[in-house]
Image (tube, rainbow, N blue to C red):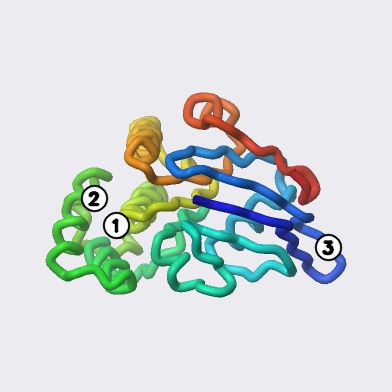
Amino acid sequence: MITIRNLTKCFNTLVAVNNLNLEIKQGELFGFLGPNGAGKTTTLRMMAGLIKPTSGTIIIDSHDLALNPLAAKQVTSFIPDRPYLYNKLTGRELLRFIGGLYRLPEQETAARAAHLLNLFSLTDWSDELIETYSHGMKQRLVMAAALLPRPKVIIVDEPMVGLDPAGSKLVKDLFKGLCARGATVFMSTHSLDIVEELCGRIGIIQDGRL
């Protein structure tokens, strides 16, 4: 499902990711560990297509991200460690916008949005501006937006940041269920407890090397 070959990213003289090679299978929940500055977030952002690698190849669901970026991104959702949202939209409007980006039918988007807003306990706030949301609510909305298009691959950077215990349990159960149904989750985290509970395999990155 995910193949990474000889992936390298340099920022001037700094080698942030150095010749990374990974193979992640369909249905796998893979944990990506390492200290701050090790190259975790840079790797995830390259996988999500947000920054271009200096060299190397990323293949997602048989699509080369460099050669066919739209096809690769169509099956991928990225959940960053901080919620970046359009604060002047409501939660429901944001999900409709995401559905439009993925070219989902309006009726399907509306039904899916209602389900996810309820799942993440955001229904009562769905027609309020996002700028009025708490940090935890924004993080839950990011999760809802990521799951809206039913992605095959979910790339997650520190998934439990800003979530209360109930929210963390919900996300853990969601990830388990998604992988059981064939989705692939690539998760960066500092938490060994989360990795031990959720992940079948892990990779540890240090100074850009696996």
Which residue is identified by label 2? 116
Measured from the top left, where is residue 19 in percent x and y?
Answer: 77, 55
Q: What residue type is labelled 1?
A: Leu
Measured from the top left, where is residue 177 in percent x and y?
Answer: 33, 36
Q: Is mark 3 on a helix, strand or loop?
A: strand
Q: Distance between the residues labelled 2 and 3?
A: 41 Å
Q: State the residue at coordinates (38%, 70%).
A: 86
Q: Based on the displayed image, in which of its 4 quarters is residue 114 positioned?
A: bottom left
Asked if residue 30 lies left or right of residue 147, the reply is right
Q: What element carries label 2?
A: helix
Tell me if label 3 and label 1 are in contact, CB under 8 Å.
Answer: no
Q: What residue type is labelled 3?
A: Leu
Q: State which quarter of the image contains the C terminus.
A: top right
Which residue is identified by label 1? 148
Q: What element carries label 1?
A: loop
For this orientation, the residue located farthest to the front is 62
Q: Distance between the residues labelled 1 and 2?
A: 7 Å
Depth check: give the residue in front, 131 or 13: 13
Measured from the top left, where is residue 125 in percent x and y?
Answer: 22, 55
